[in-house]
Amino acid sequence: MEHIISLTKENIQQVVDASMEKVVVLTFFAQQKPESIQMLQTLEQLATTQAGRFILASVDCEVEMEIAQYFQIESLPTTLILDKGRPIDGFAGVQDAASVASLLDKHLPALWLQAFDGVKAQLAQAEPLTQGALTLLVAQLKEIAVQADNMAEVRLVLADVYLQLGALADAKPLIEGIGLADQDSYYQNLKAKLALAEDAADTPEIRQLQQQLEETPGDIILSIDLAKALNKAQRNEEALACLFSFLQKDLNAGDGKVKQMFLEIMTAMGQGNALANQYRRKLYTLLY
């Protein structure tokens, strides 16, 4: 159902049924009552701004007199809030948008919840999301997390997206930070996925290079090869830390090869990546 409709005898049952799942705002107006048209316009603006948060159903009392009589409307404008088929609140007369929004907030789910449901719907799709789409979801979920006061459910979904991106270093602290009360089956599933991903990321090539570096610490060529292998396994935090330890001592380490590999890894991670931005700032500190 559209979020702005005209209520008639033909669709009233459909609207009542819709109110079982979503709040419906009924506003009664008449063309001969300018103030009622003003109230309708205010509600339409709110409904457009908060698209999908509630259904706005307007009743033209000059045409749908029976509906107005059914709801015992005595003056215009009158606005009613309908939930599960019955009026639970409302007001008569004209109110400004801020006052109406404040009233609606008492009966509507939080604004962030609608955006969060949208994210979860995307993740539930049968087709896997692209890297670009997942990166956009990360940005959305970070905003939602702030609005939701870092609610555990939001942090778990963010961790899920990070795991799908292969960003294990970002997913791990989110999963480890979930309190005992919120460690549900979804948490257990993500924890198992993280463990499997970490095992898969610990490749024989990485272990061999790490062993060689233990035998010849400070070998720049081996360190660059290790950084490449770590990057391939999505262990970018370790890769950047490995290279940065050389850059702190000499920005031209390995005849510039260390810096080149460092920049290539950060570029591949993308401009919006928090870890890349962190190390980019560290590099700027060394440069300037």
Image (spheres, grey):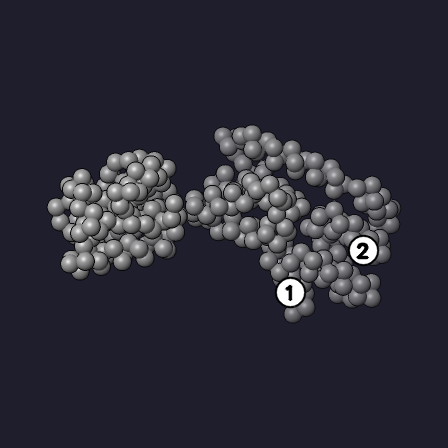
Question: How many neighbours does mark 1 have within 10 angstroms: few (below 14), some (14-19), or many (20 or more)?
Answer: few
Quarter the C terminus occupies: bottom right
Q: Residue 285 bears which disc, if any?
A: 1
Q: Residue at x 19, y 58 (%)?
A: 31
Residue drawn at (79%, 49%), measured in percent from left and top?
Answer: 229
Q: Which residue is mark 2?
A: 224
Give the x, y percent position of residue 172: 62, 41
Query: Type of residue at label 1?
Result: Thr
Which residue is depicted at the point 75% across and 56% down? Answer: 243
- Horizontal and vertical percent position of residue 28: 21, 49
Residue displayed at 15% across by 58% down: 32
Question: For this view, does 3 lie left or right of residue 244?
Answer: left
Mark 2: secondary structure: helix
Image spot of residue 230 (x, y percent): 75, 49
Query: Upstream in the sequence, badge 2 or badge 1?
Result: 2
- The alpha-carbon separation of the residues under discs 2 and 1 comes to 22 Å
**Along the line of sight, which residue is nearer the eye, 184 or 282?**
184
Mark nearest the camera among 2 and 1 is 2
Rendering coords of residue 171 (x, y %): 61, 43
Extreme residue toward the left, this view: 74
Residue 142 vs residue 260, the one in the foreground: 142
Residue 113: which numbered mark, if any? none
SS under mark 1: helix
Q: Quadrant of the N terminus?
A: top left
Left or right: residue 180 versus residue 23 is right
